[in-house]
Amino acid sequence: MRQLYLNQAALSARATTVIRDADNQSRYLLVGKWGLRSDVLTVYLIDGSLEAEVRQESLGLLPRFRLVYHRQTVGRVSKTLGVIREVLFVRGLNWVIMGNLNSGKFRIYHGRDLIATISRVTDSGATVVLAVDQPNHEGLVICLAAILDRWAKRQQHSLQLIKRRGWNPGMASEPLPFTPHQTHVKKES
């Protein structure tokens, strides 16, 4: 598996970053922006030819993205509501992404075959390493890493807002001062 490195800070609302290999050679260029419907992040080979892109198809709580490889739509990925939030499916490619948005560590599988891993290298999380099985998967994995990073940043931002408003996740484990059925029971005299 070849390892690629990218700067996580460059995966912001407006991205322009160079993706390098283990020998510090420039391999890809990631260009584009997020935030609006039909925004695009594009992955170019270092010689300027188009490799892959991710198009934002919808906004909101469950945004959807379309993956394009060599100008052909190959898959779609979206966030899902439910119990299993640590598993995402890339429809069309039949890839499964398993990992954790908080830690930034992910594994991408096709059946039992490991396609790629995504993880933060440093404690500060400033560098993301992608280990990819085949060169023709690299552009798509870069796109998926950008999507996952975006979702992780939005989740962290939401948690910070909740904490600022005074909600404490530990409060959910404290007992209520009354039981819910007591409020509806009439006392007989």
Image (cartoon, grey):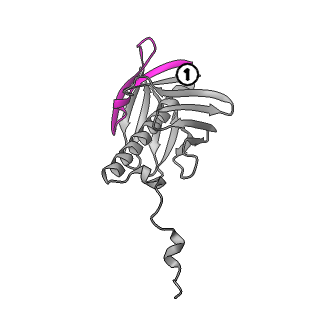
**Mark 1: which secondary structure?**
helix
For the residue pair 1 and 139, the one nearer the viewer reads as 1
Residue reaching furthest top?
A: 23
Give the amino acid type for the residue marked by disc 1 in the picture: Pro
The N terminus appears in which quarter of the rendering?
top right
- Residue 90 percent coordinates (x, y): 58, 41
Res. 150 image quadrant: top left
Write the start and end of the magenta stretch as one range: 1-28
- Residue 122 percent coordinates (x, y): 40, 23
For the residue pair 178 and 44, the one nearer the viewer reads as 178
Query: Up-down: is 25 above or below 127?
Result: above
Residue reaching furthest front?
A: 189
Residue 153 is one of the magenta-drawn residues: no
Res. 155 image quadrant: top left
Residue reaching furthest left?
A: 164
Can residue 59 be seen here?
Answer: no
- Residue 168 percent coordinates (x, y): 39, 51
- Residue 53 percent coordinates (x, y): 46, 36
Residue reaching furthest bottom?
A: 189
For the residue pair 171 and 59, the one nearer the viewer reads as 171
Can residue 178 be seen here?
Answer: yes
Local crowd at mark 1 within 10 Å, few (<14), some, or many (≥20)?
A: few
Magenta-drawn stretch, dominant element (helix, strand or loop): strand
Residue that label 1 marks: 135
Q: In percent of the image, x 42 and y 54: which residue is there?
A: 171
For the residue pair 30 and 152, the one nearer the viewer reads as 152
